[in-house]
Amino acid sequence: MTTLLKRHDFILLLLPCLLALTGCGEVVDPEAEEELVAFDADAGSAIEAAAKTPRARIVDLTSGEIAEFLQSADPAQSAILDLRTPEEFAEGHLEGALNVDFQADDFRSQIEKLDPQLTYVIHCQSGGRSGRAVDAFKSLGFERILHMSDGYSGWTRDDRPVVKGEKAP
């Protein structure tokens, strides 16, 4: 009986620890929860909501979702930033894209010149460089970044239109 009681006490002591480790009873910031609800309810899709939300928002989207966004995007309120090298850009890029080479020494100073209030679609070849660039955009106060997580490769894999042979502006 004593061994059973000790085992029972051990389980009772262990249970709260396990619950804490698994996140049960996690305290949720009510303001953050409202933001998520508003994010879902304010627009017909996550794409529209990300573009319209007044709070800082960085969203990973597929090339298909980006294509959907670009169909209705206001060019005066949004821009496409191709973060690949000028050579990659010349081989093919999304129509209207600006080339801002992530690997260039002056990358940060180039994005400092951009309007942080606009919605930016950022991408590279496969999502790696642009994924790393997100921190620079955040630190500079950019409010709306749509990161094309599958990059130019995803865009071309689905036979979406590209411009070839143009050098970076």
Image (cartoon, rainbow, N blue to C red):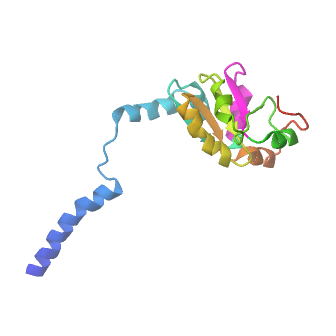
- Which quarter of the figure has residue 107? top right
Q: Residue furthest top?
A: 76
In the rendered image, residue 134, in percent from the top left (x then y), is placed at 59, 39
Q: Residue furthest left?
A: 2
In the rendered image, residue 169, in percent from the top left (x then y), is placed at 82, 28
- Residue at 29 percent of width and 49 percent of height: 25
48 left or right, relative to 91: left
89 left or right, relative to 108: right
Task: Give yes or no for residue 42 being in the magenta stretch.
Answer: no
Magenta stretch: give its range. Answer: 65-83
Q: Quadrant of the N terminus?
A: bottom left
In the rendered image, residue 59, in percent from the top left (x then y), is placed at 58, 38
Task: Give yes or no for residue 69 being in the magenta stretch.
Answer: yes
In the rendered image, residue 128, in percent from the top left (x then y), is placed at 66, 49
> In front: 114, or 38?
114
80 left or right, relative to 141: right
